[in-house]
Amino acid sequence: MGSVRQTPRRHSHFRLGAARFAERVCSALGGRAFYRSRYLAAGRLVVRTETARVPRLPAALEGFCIVQISDLHGGSFLGPGDLAHLVDTVDALAPDVIALTGDFVTHDAREVERVAGDLARLRAPLGVYAVFGNHDYRGREEALIAAALPGVCFLRNASARVQRDGASVAFVGVEDLEEGRVVDLDLARAGLAPGDVEIVLCHNPLGARAIARAGCAAILSGHTHAGQIDLPFLRRLGPKHPGLRLLLGDTLLVTSRGVGAVGVPLRIGAPAEIVVVRLARRVD
Ligand SMILES: [Fe+2]
Ligand SMILES: [Fe+2]
């Protein structure tokens, strides 16, 4: 994948309109309180652990810990304080880095205000990095989202290198494959140095195979909500889901089920989750 100029907008106005209508109805019926207690409370929120096995991983990076949080969808079903348990859980995991893989909002960039207070409490010694998801480009006001989250470094076809005991991990972020104006992996990787362990943040997992061909340790994606309501007759309505964990050669693709919800405050067979990704040396 080099530079790919996008034709913006894949959102179906009909689907988004239907989702907004359903959200208003469910919200009036107490959808937000239901969602918080059913999916985000202690004992409900899932913490999934994945290990990225990396050939020739420097000893200094053994156990390097990334916590991935995806698809918050601040709005009707997620507001101030609803992420309190999630943030406390992340804190207890003591990650080196936190990665946010997009869809902070659903319909309007201003919905970010509903989660900004909770997200401001996220702490990681080597930083909090993010990419935008397709919903975040609505109205082309991504800058509002970034401004509301001053502690978060957004990687827009860009990278950030972090060091632990002299060894480097590079976080590479690409614009959303559907809504970003230009997706440029080559530009995003331009700042990498030989020997960097590369982790790519890419909201939509559909681009993972092309990214993996360029070589990286892991790709962190979201977008699919793992179907959100994972029933056979509804499965085709949402984005194609490649599976929670997929090996593409030496590259681990992690697709998060996400945290929030679109349309209805319901998840079936796809609990809300955060993902802990740990690096480990691969021994052949
Ligand atoms: Fe999403
Ligand atoms: Fe998405």
Image (tube, rainbow, N blue to C red):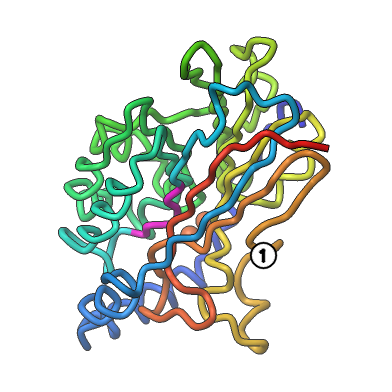
Q: Which x, y percent locates residue 262?
A: 42, 70
Residue 47 occupies quadrant: bottom left
Q: Is residue 217 left or right of residue 98?
A: right
Magenta range is: 68-73
- Closest to the observer: 182 or 175? 175
For the N terminus, give its image quadrant.
top right
Which residue is label 1 attached to?
241
Disc 1 crowd, CA 10 A, few/some/many (<14, 14-19, 20+) = many
Q: Residue at x 76, y 50 (%)?
A: 247
Q: Secondary structure at mark 1?
A: loop
Q: Which x, y percent locates residue 65?
A: 47, 38
- Closest to the observer: 80 or 12? 80
The answer to whether 19 is drawn above or below residue 112 in the figure is below
Q: Residue at x 70, y 21 (%)?
A: 186
Magenta-colored segment: predominant secondary structure: loop
Residue 56 occupies quadrant: top right
Q: Is residue 73 left or right of residue 24?
A: right
Q: Which x, y percent locates residue 161?
A: 50, 18
Q: Which x, y percent locates residue 193?
A: 64, 10
For the C terminus, give its image quadrant.
top right
